[in-house]
Structures are given as structure tokens and as C-alpha cells.
Image: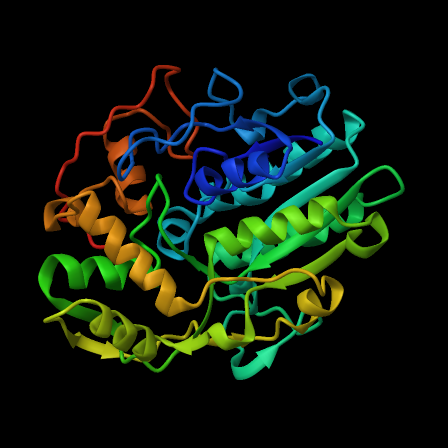
Amino acid sequence: MKILVAGDRGYIGAVLVPFLRAAGHSVDGLDIGLYEGCDLGPAPEDIGLRIPRDIRDAEPAHLSGYDAVVCLAALSNDPLGNLNPAATFSVNLDGTLALARAVKRAGIERFVFASSCSLYGAAGSAGVAEDAELVPVTPYGQAKVLAERQLSLLADDAFSPTYLRNATAYGSSPRLRLDIVVNNLTAVAMTTGQVRLESDGSPWRPLVHIEDISRTCLAVLEGPRELVHDEAFNVGRKEDNVQVREIAEMVRDAVPGSAVTLADGAGPDIRNYRVDFAKLSDSFPDLELHWRVQDGVAQLVRSYAEHGLTYADFRSSRFVRLRRIQELLADGLVDDMLHRQTLEPFAVTDKVSNLVS
């Protein structure tokens, strides 16, 4: 199969692309390039289209010859989404639909959309399945809900979208992110000796390793159309619905000498939900998600140590998406709606930021 991954130069894409290639597929990439140079260790493999491409500008001519398209491209978390909600909707909703319409006009049937369990919002401690009410509490989650609904309206005999509602991702990637909970807490412990909680630790989070996201994406791409057509799947394992304080304890146990601490004013977080993953396991009985959170923490500890992650790295713009976008805005390299203002590769300054993510 010939597959185009939109957002191949991001955190998940840097792991997904080689995973799909190892399974025997031909894979290209399409990416605007906002995070070039934001790497821990060697950069992701340079593949795909050489000119940076915004999904909002996608045309059928860009997509000729592909059998399937995977859409990872998005502004990737709640703090970044809150920075400018209009830009979030422009990229995560309008951009997704622009890409999907171009895919459909190009005659490509399979479209896999990286959605999110965050669209369940404040569902609480009862596990929610795919048919649960969607109550997103942030622009990021709201845009994902609307994108799924609009993609469903496009679905027909010639266009078959599938929605992967990924749990909160974690794990080592060449294009590291430190603004997601497991990666963040492990980095804080490694660089300061403190596993610092910004909430009281009570909220529930469903977690999934990026390699298991990749494994699920492969299963959906290779699965029969009737199984995946216009279907949503929560992506993760039942065992990995955990409270934030449990994550902190796993990190403390993996980083010798570290201790769990609470930030001043730490309290409950309204983002609080558990997820039911039964549909995925029932639909794909041969799909085995391999990673336990403890193993992912151990992987991160090894990766951070191998590449010498420092506190200055942690505070820089390289690994926190909000800080990176604020840096690009300040330097005039993107406009307020995050359209590129240059085709030159973006430089990484490694500035230590005083901004709070």
C-alpha cells in the first residue's frame, strides 16, 4: 500500500512512518515543518514532499497515486489550542476537512483521522465508550468533535474515514514532546529530582504509547473496509486508565532519588475521564498493544539519559509545542493563524523560555 502521512514530522509521525515502512508499506509525508530541529537525538528520517505543505492548502494534485492518507497534522494539545482558538479551529477543523475533500476528489478511499479521547472532556471516573456523549472542555477537543462529524458527512462508497480516538500519548520519539503528562513528569524527575504535579493528582487519564498508536493505525489501514468504515475507535488499553498521582509514583520509582511534589495551588483538573477500549479489542482480536506505562517510563528514562536531557532543554522551546509556536509568532515566521511566512526551514534557537505552558 502507498500511504501519505500528513504530519509525518511530528511526535507521532516520527514513530508511525518507520513503523508502517517496516510492515512493508511505501510511505511519504506532508508537513508544514513547524517543529523542524525540535529533536532529541537524530532527526526523523527525511521523507516525502520536499516543500513544506499546510493541510489547509491541500489539493488533489498533491495526493495522486496514494492508496490511503493518515491525518496526524494538528495543533496538538489544550494549552496550544487555548492560545488562539480561531487558529486551532482553522488547522484542526478546516485543515482536516480541506485535506479530506482533496483526498476524496483524488479518488483515495481510505482516510484515517487521528482524533482524541479528549473529546470526552469531563466524563469522570466511569469508563466511556465510543457512543458516549461528547463533552469537550477545550477548543482542541471541540475541534476534534466537529472534524469527526464533518468527516462522517463526507463518508460514502468512495470515501471511507476512520476515527482513532487516541488516549493521551507517551513514549520516546525523535521529535520529542514534553508537554504530555508521562513524558513531562519523567523529564522533570530526571532534570530536577522532583516529580512535580500541577494538579492534585486525582484526575483520571487514559494513556497509550505512540508505538501502540502506530500499531493500531496499521491494523485499521490493513483491516477490511466494512469493519472500519465511518467508525470511531478508542485507542488504548483498559489497564492504562490511571490517575495522575499513579503516574507520578511510577516515575518516582523509576528515577532514583526523586520525590513527588505538588505545585503551589495544585487542585483538581476538570479534564478527568476514563475510557472503555473494548470496541478496539473486540473488532481487532489479533491486535496486541504491547506497552505498559511502567515500561514507557523506563524507555523515557533511558532515552533522556542517553541523549543528556538537561533542565535547560526542558525549559527551551524545542520540546514544548506552545513555546515553539510562541517563538515562531514572535519572530514573524508564522502569522496569527499559523500560516508560514517563509519557505525557508525554521531554525531552533534553544531559547530558555520564561513562558508557562
- Give how far across and how far down residue 27 sits, in percent: 59, 29
Count of all numbered marks drawn on residues in the image: 0
| Residue 339 vs residue 157, the one in the foreground | 157
The structure residue drawn at horizontal position 49% and vertical position 34%, both measured from the top left corner, is 8
The structure residue drawn at horizontal position 37% and vertical position 61%, both measured from the top left corner, is 296
The structure residue drawn at horizontal position 56% and vertical position 34%, both measured from the top left corner, is 6
Q: Quadrant of the C terminus?
A: bottom left
Find residue 78 and report its image quarter: bottom left
| Residue 159 vs residue 282, the one in the foreground | 282
Horizontal side, residue 86 vs residue 356: left or right: right
The structure residue drawn at horizontal position 41% and vertical position 33%, both measured from the top left corner, is 338
Image: 183 above or below 342:
below
Q: Quadrant of the N terminus?
A: top right
| Residue 59 vs residue 186, the one in the foreground | 186
Find residue 191 and report its image quarter: bottom left
Horizontal side, residue 50 vs residue 324: left or right: right
Q: Is residue 2 visible?
A: yes
- Give how far across and how far down residue 230 sits, in percent: 78, 53
The type of colouring in the image is rainbow
**Residue lying at the far right of the rendered structure:** 157
Q: Is residue 357 visible?
A: no
Horizontal side, residue 286 vs residue 95: left or right: right
- Give how far across and how far down residue 349 sits, in percent: 18, 30
Find residue 183 and report its image quarter: bottom left
- Give how far across and how far down residue 309 sits, in percent: 17, 47
